[in-house]
């Protein structure tokens, strides 16, 4: 299970929309306090944490997660809309395993997530797909169109990326 903690609901929906059709179990959480409550009963395999959240930020949450004996080594992917966050101070060493800056490509995020637990992503053909391994599930395409219609720039880039792959 991937636990995604972000106060931006559109980002939570985007991550969930992309990951679920690929077979990921996704737990979306709107803030650090709720995430810590859920961790009393859940054991995610990977965390995807936004840094800039009201209340407890992603760095504080990562620190709390690392302090839990059950999650000392659970992979953490930090996400930030601020490119300068990528240059982390020494005291943040060990708090996370990978870092990605928004806006990011879904392909890059999936690759980084797959690398964390050393999982290989394999495309499995379903009965509804034809022989084109580049085909994107219609639910993902539809969600990207919805997000693009409200001005989500990353969705527009993804739609173009998928069109170019199909060509």
Image (cartoon, rainbow, N blue to C red):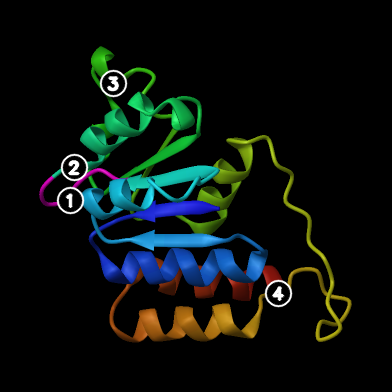
**70 lies left or right of 134:** left
Q: Earlier in the sequence, mark 4 or mark 3?
A: 3
CA gap, disc 4 to disc 3? 41 Å
**101 lies left or right of 123:** left
**143 lies left or right of 68:** right
Name the residue that disc number 1 marks: 53
Tell me if residue 38 is in the magenta stretch: no
State the residue at coordinates (56%, 44%): 113
Name the residue that disc number 4 marks: 166
Query: Looking at the picture, how far across and down is residue 129, in whole percent?
Result: 81, 82
State the residue at coordinates (62%, 44%): 114
In the rendered view, would you say 95 is above or below 147?
A: above
State the residue at coordinates (36%, 65%): 12
Neighbours of disc 2 within 10 Å: few (<14), some (14-19), many (20+): some
CA gap, disc 1 to disc 4? 37 Å
Name the residue that disc number 2 marks: 57
* Front tag of 4 and 3: 3
Query: Looking at the picture, how far across and down is residue 46, in whole percent?
Result: 51, 43
Name the residue that disc number 3 marks: 92
33 or 141: which is nearer to us? 33
């Amino acid at each position: 299970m991937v636990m995604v903690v972000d106060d931006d609901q559109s980002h939570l929906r985007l991550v969930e929309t992309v990951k679920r059709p690929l077979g990921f179990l996704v737990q979306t959480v709107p803030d650090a306090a709720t995430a810590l409550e859920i961790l009393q009963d859940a054991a995610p395999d990977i965390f995807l944490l936004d840094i800039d959240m009201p209340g407890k930020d992603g760095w504080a949450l990562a620190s709390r997660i690392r302090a839990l004996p059950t999650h000392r080594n659970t992979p953490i992917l930090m996400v930030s809309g601020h490119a300068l966050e990528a240059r982390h101070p020494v005291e943040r060493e060990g708090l996370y395993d990978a870092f990605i800056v928004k806006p990011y490509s879904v392909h890059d995020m999936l690759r980084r997530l797959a690398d964390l637990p050393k999982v290989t992503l394999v495309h499995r053909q379903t009965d509804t797909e034809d022989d084109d391994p580049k085909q994107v599930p219609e639910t993902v395409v539809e969600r990207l169109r919805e997000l693009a219609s409200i001005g989500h720039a990353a969705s527009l880039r993804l739609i173009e990326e998928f069109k170019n792959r199909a060509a």
